Image (cartoon, rainbow, N blue to C red):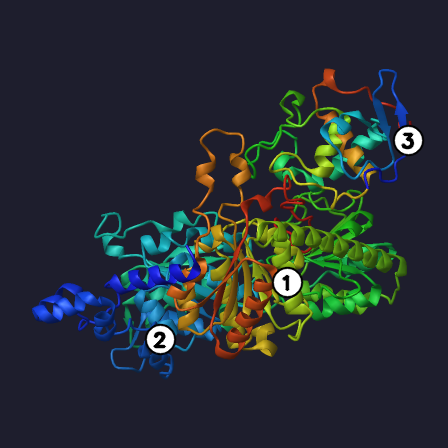
Amino acid sequence: MSENQNREVQKTNASAGAAGEPESRPSRRGLFASLGAGAAAAALVNPGKIFAATTPPIPSIRIPKEVTDTLAEATHVGDFSEKGGITGAEVFAKSCKDEDLAALFCCPGNYQIINAISAAGIPAFGGRSEGSMTSAADGFSRCTGEVTACSGTEGPGFTNMIMNIAVAHRARTPLLVLASNVTIATDDREYFIQTGYQQPTTEGLKKYGKRLIAPDRVHEYAAYAFRNLKTGVPGPVHLDFPGEIYRARFTEASQLKEYYGKEKYRSESRPHPAPKDLAQAVDMINRAERPVIVAGHGVFFRKAWEPLMVAAEKNDIAVVTSGPMRGHFPDEHRLSASLSPDAFMSADLVVFVGQYSMPTKQEWRFNPEAKAIRVNPTGEDLGRNWPLDLGIVSDEAAFLEGLASDLPQKKRDTWVGELASARQKYEKRLLDEYEQGVKHSQATNTVHQAVVCKEVHDFLYKGNIDPKQTVTGWGGWTIGNCGARWLRAYRPGQEVNCPYQYSAVGPDLAMMIGAGAAVQLGVGPQAPYKGAPVLVLTSDAGITYSMFELDTAAKYKIPIVCVVFNNNAWGMWPSAVGTPRSMHMYLFQENLRYDKMAEGLGARGEYVRTQDEFRRALKTSYEVAAKERVSTLINVQALKEFTSGKDYPPGNIINPEPSVGALAH
Amino acid sequence: MYLKRWGAIALLAGGGVLLVSGDAPAKLTREDAQKLKSPVAYSKKSIARGRVIFMQNCTSCHGENGKAEGSLVADATDLTSPQLYKSGTSEGEIFHSVRDGAGDQMPAFKGQLDNETDIWNLVNFIRSLWPEGQRPAVQEDGK
């Protein structure tokens, strides 16, 4: 069926459907009934003309006026002096406001809490599914380092968030998970429809959690939450709210227990390295010939990229970033080892700073004989998985500031040369993959993953756009592993590693819509690029889980370019090879049109089958996103066989760790 | 370029070709691979080096013990049972599988392991996972 025929079929189907039609629109049966016999006969001669003349157009997708109107309303933070006092929900929202909660992503449910938080002026976004909203909050935090919140209703809304809470947990995201949970009075009675014991459900997926059961302790537990979110190694905090908590009313502060401000319920004090530990670290680094700093989450969350740069440059220390975000050390820097994984085997000292998810020794591409220093804000994890030569309990920023101050100036030309040589080799390898991808694309009239990724790379980093401007994220299997090798990070918070540590398929688009919200607001390291579009590389399998959030992106004018690598299958389809009656479970219908689905959700759709078409679509989509704040989904038709190296080498390659594209730690 | 920096080709008594090389040919058939002989001795040093490479590149599919008990892919080969190998058990065939990929799921590692000596070290480590009676005899380092 041709493209035009396709359009005609869709037009006809849309015309026949009732959804969205104004009530005044006549049905065909009604139309005939209202016509005289002669007119009806005439109509039968040329029915298209009659319908064209009498059928009103299908209403356009549009943003309700209430959306823009309510977003423009004045903020309101509850106050004890108001008539009727302040509700428990408003007390909690006030605490969130005082703690500079950066954003809330939610679906309706837990009404009093989300309403109070939004009314208080905290940027709030309502979406289509609780799980995706959880990942949107996660994405916002991954590119800003700020505490964000997500919320859903009790029962189904809450359980819909579980996978995404787990994703945030593995990434150590400071995520405040909120959910309503019926009432204390009806506990254990299976009363009504949404009862569930929430806290046991998030066991193992959170840093701290509590079902609030005393209305007068609502502020106290907000303090518990933010103490955990803003101190030590971050992680999700989960609070569930029975009705007695958020509906309680207070007319004076004395009715609340432990009601005092953040300066009294938590401390900004941070552990500094003991002088002898710092001196030993300086000595070990200075005596090493090929030292590497692994700059993990903690460096980003503590915004310690400046002392990291000073320390590295002062002593010519190689730096590789790790964690669910990239950019806290720029990829193009001569000391960056993120594109030089082959150099790691000759490193003789590895300094882990804020590496919260530790690999086991030899899991990473370091010489097993290399000495190791690990710096962590808490002591209980030191020595886990990786034997230490020196363990230091310290805030990451304090340690790096100490290094920047105490390290002597030193040049390591041989080491720096080896890094450059390894980077050159790595980039040559990428270009070789790309050349193979071009041949595969031309031979199949589809687009190979390496071609997609090279085009994105050239467009974002080698064209007219400031290479530092665009925040990117990646997910999926074949496209994700490839995309991770081609995406770059030149400044803090520029790249989000969506599947980090948990390998979830699906949060990618939602996570990047959250990141897009942060860019629109210009939060933290996104401030210089406020308003820029974001881009996500994902797969047809992955897009399934959060595609409806294109509606959310459109509603809030969060511009995103979403590249869907459509290879008609789950990336793991080779796992069915050789087993009878299995492959059908791994495949989708071929040639599905995700671009059309996107159009139905209020975004633009582009469909491409060639490299040139993709290049043009990418340029147009980015321009529309930048100028009109409209999102686009680019459906890139590919083949599932590109995952396998059997017929289309090199196939899917799992990236070495640590480096760009590291997935597991 | 079929013969890339080819070291030596020795005629076998049976009329076959024994391929002894520093670098193996860029393209290999299964039959070619069967004839390949490792230039790296099956020694403790080589096995130890191969283990490091294995841990950094292979464990996500084949597991730390080589038994492929993980869930990332369905049909990764249990490397401890040579009778289960799908693409051959000669040292050349294992080399070929690692360097050029095998089946639908095993990717080619020639991009990531472009030093062929390391691939031969890995081959030696893989063979060290076999049941004792099936392993080659360990040679002295340096031979």
Residue topped by disc 2: A253
Q: State how many labels appear.
A: 3
Residue A455 disc label: 1
> Residue A565 versus residue A418: which sits nearer the camera?
A565
**Whether residue A7 is visible:** yes
Q: Earlier in the sequence, mark 2 or mark 1?
A: 2
Q: Along the horizontal axis of the image, is A541 left or right of A383?
A: left
Residue topped by disc 3: B8
User: Could you give the CA–CA distance between mark 3 and mark 1, rounded to whole angstroms?
Assistant: 43 Å
Say which chain tag 1 marks: A
User: Could you give the CA–CA distance between mark 3 and mark 2, rounded to whole angstroms?
Assistant: 89 Å
User: Considering the numbered disc 3 on the image, is that residue within a helix, a strand or a loop?
Assistant: strand
Q: Along the horizontal axis of the image, is A608 left or right of A269?
A: left
Work out whether B29 lies above or below A537.
above
> Residue A632 versus residue A124: which sits nearer the camera?
A632
Asked where in the image residue B92 lies, by quadrant, the reply is top right
Q: Along the horizontal axis of the image, is B35 left or right of A624?
A: right
Work out whether A615 lies above or below A251.
above
Q: Nearer the viewer, mark 3 or mark 2?
A: 3
Asked where in the image residue A530 lies, by quadrant, the reply is bottom right
Determine contact: label 2, label 1, CB under 8 Å.
no
> Residue A319 versus residue A532: which sits nearer the camera?
A532
Quadrant containing the N terminus of chain A is: bottom left
Say which chain tag 2 marks: A
Say which chain tag 3 marks: B
> Which amino acid type is marked by label 1?
Glu
